[in-house]
Image: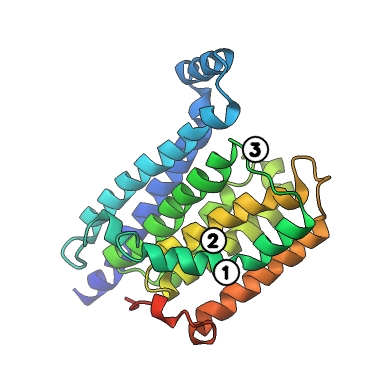
């Protein structure tokens, strides 16, 4: 009985990871279905902007995330009690503290971008800087880390690392031997970033709003430095600003009292 109890969290987690991978494959290759491709062609010919047409990607992640969460509730059984979708994902409380901490974290990128780059606020930023970051955090950190730890009992670091790998994989395009062979550094960096985001969400009292805000601001500010073609601002400046932001966020998370934001910490679980 003891062996079965020890294996249960890993069995539930492994099943969830396989289902999550299947969800990523579905989202990636949905465009291969004739009807779906025809729908996008019709939308494009009707004048719908590309960023608006592609919002269906985020819709898929949002809906599939709910499905994966519901699956984990069943797999976890009575061992772990769900407290509802939003609470399990770290979204029920902490909106204001999350917004405050997220903005402070991104001050280096915001300040340097506004002074040395070119402030750009375009319609496509609705997806890049708002909807995309929210849904990615919802699926990869909320469902695959915070909810998974609570509902299956698997260790935080196991959930964070596997979730980070899946997050890195979706940033590889195309999914092919050559794609992974040439883009693995990008996948690695993105995956490590996913683990870092998960750690911050946990450290701030299971508050996903912290990383949603930080992720949204990072995506919004990035074009201020490099633009669409890499000619606006400086890549070096962007990397410096991002490094300063990461350093500030890490120190703030470890020692929030130094920045007078310990009140936003909340209680860990």
Determine the CA span between mark 3 and mark 1: 32 Å
Please, is residue 130 above or below residue 202 in the view?
Answer: above
Q: Counting other residues with Cα less than 10 Å from the Cα at mark 3, is it few (<14), some (14-19), or many (20 or more)?
A: few
Q: Earlier in the sequence, mark 3 or mark 1?
A: 1
Give SS at disc 2. helix
**Residue visible at 47% across and 79% down?**
261
Give the residue pinned by disc 1.
105
**Residue visible at 46% across and 71% down?**
157
Q: Earlier in the sequence, mark 3 or mark 2?
A: 3
Which color scheme does this rendered protein use?
Answer: rainbow
User: Camera-side residue: 266 or 118?
Assistant: 118
Give SS at disc 3. loop
Please, is residue 97 above or below residue 144 in the view?
Answer: below
User: Camera-side residue: 16 or 31?
Assistant: 31
Determine the CA span between mark 2 and mark 1: 7 Å
Give the residue pinned by disc 3.
174
**Closer to the eye: label 3 or 1:** 1
Give the residue pinned by disc 2.
214
**Residue visible at 35% across and 53% down?**
15
Give SS at disc 1. helix
Determine the CA span between mark 3 and mark 2: 27 Å
Pinpoint residue 246: horizontal percent, then vertical percent: 63, 70
Q: Earlier in the sequence, mark 2 or mark 1?
A: 1
Using the rendered image of the protein, determine whether residue 159 is visible from the camera's viewpoint. no
Q: Are marks 2 and 1 in contact (CB under 8 Å)?
A: yes
């Amino acid at each position: 009985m003891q062996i079965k109890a020890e294996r249960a969290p890993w069995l539930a987690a492994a099943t969830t990871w396989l289902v999550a991978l299947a969800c990523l494959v579905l989202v990636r290759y949905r465009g291969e279905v004739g009807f779906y491709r025809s729908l996008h062609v019709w939308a494009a010919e009707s004048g719908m902007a590309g960023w608006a047409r592609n919002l269906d990607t985020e819709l898929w992640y949002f809906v599939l995330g709910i499905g994966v969460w519901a699956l984990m509730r069943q797999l976890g059984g009575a061992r772990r009690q769900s407290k509802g979708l939003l609470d399990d994902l770290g979204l029920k409380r902490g909106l204001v503290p999350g917004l405050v901490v997220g903005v402070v974290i991104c001050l280096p990128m915001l300040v340097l971008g506004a002074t040395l780059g070119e402030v750009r606020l375009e319609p496509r930023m609705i997806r890049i800087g708002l909807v995309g970051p929210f849904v990615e955090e919802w699926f990869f950190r909320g469902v695959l880390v915070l909810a998974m730890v609570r509902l299956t009992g698997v260790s935080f670091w196991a959930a964070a690392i596997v979730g980070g790998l899946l997050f890195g994989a979706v940033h590889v395009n195309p999914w092919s031997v050559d794609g992974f062979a040439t883009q693995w550094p990008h996948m690695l960096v993105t995956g490590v970033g996913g683990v870092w985001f998960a750690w911050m969400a946990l450290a701030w009292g299971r508050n996903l709003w912290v990383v949603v805000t930080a992720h949204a601001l990072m995506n919004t500010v990035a074009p201020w430095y490099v633009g669409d073609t890499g000619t606006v601002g400086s890549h070096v400046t962007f990397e410096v600003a991002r490094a300063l932001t990461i350093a500030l966020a890490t120190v703030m998370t470890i020692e929030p009292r130094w920045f007078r934001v310990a009140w936003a910490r909340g209680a860990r679980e």
